[in-house]
Image (tube, grey):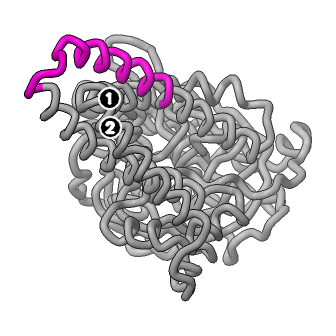
């Protein structure tokens, strides 16, 4: 990720625990529809989930008629308020659950969000009920109660959509399978987006980090952990690569952005597109030397950029010709926070295609990525994952928003193929608009 800070301060921007995504049905971490989604084709017409949905609908209509519209409206407003407050508390939730395993952490975060929604709904409903009590038993009260029944039905439908969608996409196979077999859930999923994506889209609107959306929907639960090298081992791996890792500094829309660049050929650095997006000036620092850089390739979909840096001295690194395997160890090099070069012990948890969005959060894109066990920080974007043989095994471009110990890198094969045409170019290309 790049380190973004207003030009007048040194305050780093924060992160939310979810990445934003909004158009695709929930699927597995490979971007494919999960087995539970595939089960939507099941031939059973109703099940226990459907029965519960019918009972909920009847109860909600009766309760709506009894309580009236105002408590329903107040409850909805309170629930939305609770959701927004929970999403704003995302960084705090991530911090206090950092010591938990992935599944308990996911349960804790989702539980906190649901609790905030329920508390907000209760408070809002109480306020609405107090207002309704002032209407008395006149004609207005009767109309208000009739509307309350309709709103109660609508709330029941939304609750079935919310709970069903979360169960289908959640880490509970048995409950998810039952929900995916439900006729109610199938019908609702045909006309409404998955609730996980709605939550993620709201979170994206609140997120000012400028990071690309790695996934459509919420971040998946990370893969099982792998052993990482010791700091001494990581330092030895990184020793030969330090001379080819530069600090990138840009100014875009009155914001100072710092990231990392990797020297991959004489006078050519590769970094992330989101590091240089909208930049008016780009400078590379390596070995105490500061050189103006010219963007010669800018790909906002894959999230890579190539910079021409005439006269920059350093030792170019080469990409490995294969994608690293699970368990392969290495080191991540980056200028976290725009500070000095930092070496992080890292290991590859897995490789898979991830459907997310371009760096502007607009078009859907699929990237081949590596999931890393590495606590990457703002400013590490564009830094190399260096393997034991000294080759580049990936290009860091994002961190998990649910697990601070997980980062993501673009695969070496995808990056090397994309940037190859840029070598030899010296003319500047358009680097698009600023982020956020």
User: Which residue is identified by label 2?
Assistant: 64
Q: Determine the residue located farthest toward the bottom in the rendered image.
A: 43
Looking at the rendering, which quadrant does residue 123 occupy? top left
User: Is residue 134 depicted above or below 57 in this figure?
Assistant: above
Q: Position of residue 131 (x, y in %)?
A: 23, 14
Looking at the rendering, which quadrant does residue 188 occupy? bottom left
Q: Measure how far apart labels 1 and 2 are at the Cα level.
A: 5 Å
**Which stretch did the figure color magenta?**
118-140
Q: Position of residue 346 (x, y in %)?
A: 77, 48
Q: Position of residue 114 (x, y in %)?
A: 54, 35
| Viewer can see residue 273 | no
User: Residue sitting at 33 percent across and 62 percent down?
Assistant: 192
User: Residue sitting at 56 percent across and 51 percent down?
Assistant: 219
Q: Residues within 10 Å of mark 2 (few under 14, many from 20)?
A: many
Q: Is residue 409 magenta?
A: no
Horizontal relation, residue 310 to residue 259: left or right: left
Q: Is residue 122 magenta?
A: yes
| Viewer can see residue 426 | yes
Q: Which mark is residue 108?
A: none
Report the predominant secondary structure element of the magenta stretch: helix
User: Residue sitting at 91 percent across and 41 percent down?
Assistant: 230
Q: Name the element at disc 1.
A: helix
Q: Name the element at disc 2.
A: helix
Q: Are marks 1 and 2 in contact (CB under 8 Å)?
A: yes
Horizontal relation, residue 375 to residue 337: left or right: right
User: Residue sitting at 68 percent across and 41 percent down?
Assistant: 107
Q: Residues within 10 Å of mark 1 (few under 14, many from 20)?
A: many
User: Which residue is identified by label 1?
Assistant: 67
User: Is residue 242 depicted above or below 354 in this figure?
Assistant: above
**Quadrant housing the C terminus:** top left
User: Is residue 435 depicted above or below 174 in this figure?
Assistant: above
């Amino acid at each position: 990720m790049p380190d973004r800070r207003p030009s007048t301060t040194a305050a780093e921007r924060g992160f939310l625990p979810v990445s934003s995504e909004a158009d695709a049905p929930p699927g597995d971490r490979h971007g494919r529809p999960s087995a539970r989604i595939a089960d939507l084709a099941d031939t059973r017409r109703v099940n226990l989930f459907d029965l519960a949905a019918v009972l909920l609908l009847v109860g909600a209509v009766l309760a709506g008629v009894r309580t009236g519209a105002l408590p329903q409206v107040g409850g909805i407003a309170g629930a939305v308020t609770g959701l927004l407050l929970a999403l704003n508390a995302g960084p705090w939730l991530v911090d206090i659950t950092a010591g938990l395993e992935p599944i308990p952490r996911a349960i804790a975060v989702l539980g906190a969000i649901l609790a905030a929604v329920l508390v907000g709904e209760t408070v809002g409903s109480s306020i609405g009920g107090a207002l309704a009590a002032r209407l008395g038993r006149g004609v207005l009260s009767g109309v208000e109660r009739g509307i309350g029944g309709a709103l109660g039905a609508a709330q029941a439908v939304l609750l079935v959509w919310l709970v069903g969608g979360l169960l289908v996409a959640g880490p509970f196979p048995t409950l998810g399978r039952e929900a995916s077999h439900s006729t109610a859930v199938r019908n609702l999923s045909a006309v409404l987006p998955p609730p996980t994506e709605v939550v993620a889209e709201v979170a994206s609107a609140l997120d000012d980090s400028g990071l690309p959306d790695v996934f459509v929907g919420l971040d998946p639960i990370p893969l099982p952990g792998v052993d990482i090298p010791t700091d001494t081992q990581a330092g030895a791996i990184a020793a030969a690569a330090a001379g080819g890792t530069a600090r990138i500094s840009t100014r875009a829309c009155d914001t100072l952005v710092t990231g990392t660049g990797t020297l991959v050929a004489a006078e050519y650095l590769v970094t992330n597109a989101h590091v240089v997006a909208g930049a008016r000036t780009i400078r590379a620092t390596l070995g105490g030397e500061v050189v103006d850089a010219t963007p010669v390739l800018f790909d906002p979909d894959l999230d890579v950029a190539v910079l021409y840096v005439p006269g920059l001295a350093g030792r170019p690194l080469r990409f490995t010709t294969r994608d690293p395997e699970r368990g392969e160890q290495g080191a991540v090099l980056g200028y976290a926070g725009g500070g000095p070069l930092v070496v992080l012990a890292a290991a590859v948890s897995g490789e898979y295609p991830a459907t997310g969005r371009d760096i502007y959060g607009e078009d859907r894109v699929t990237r081949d990525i590596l999931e890393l066990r590495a606590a990457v920080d703002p400013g590490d974007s564009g830094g190399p994952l260096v393997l034991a043989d000294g080759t580049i095994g990936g290009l860091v471009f994002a961190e998990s928003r649910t697990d601070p110990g997980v980062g993501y890198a673009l695969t070496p094969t995808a990056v090397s193929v994309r940037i190859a045409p840029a070598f030899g170019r010296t003319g500047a290309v358009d680097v698009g608009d600023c982020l956020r």
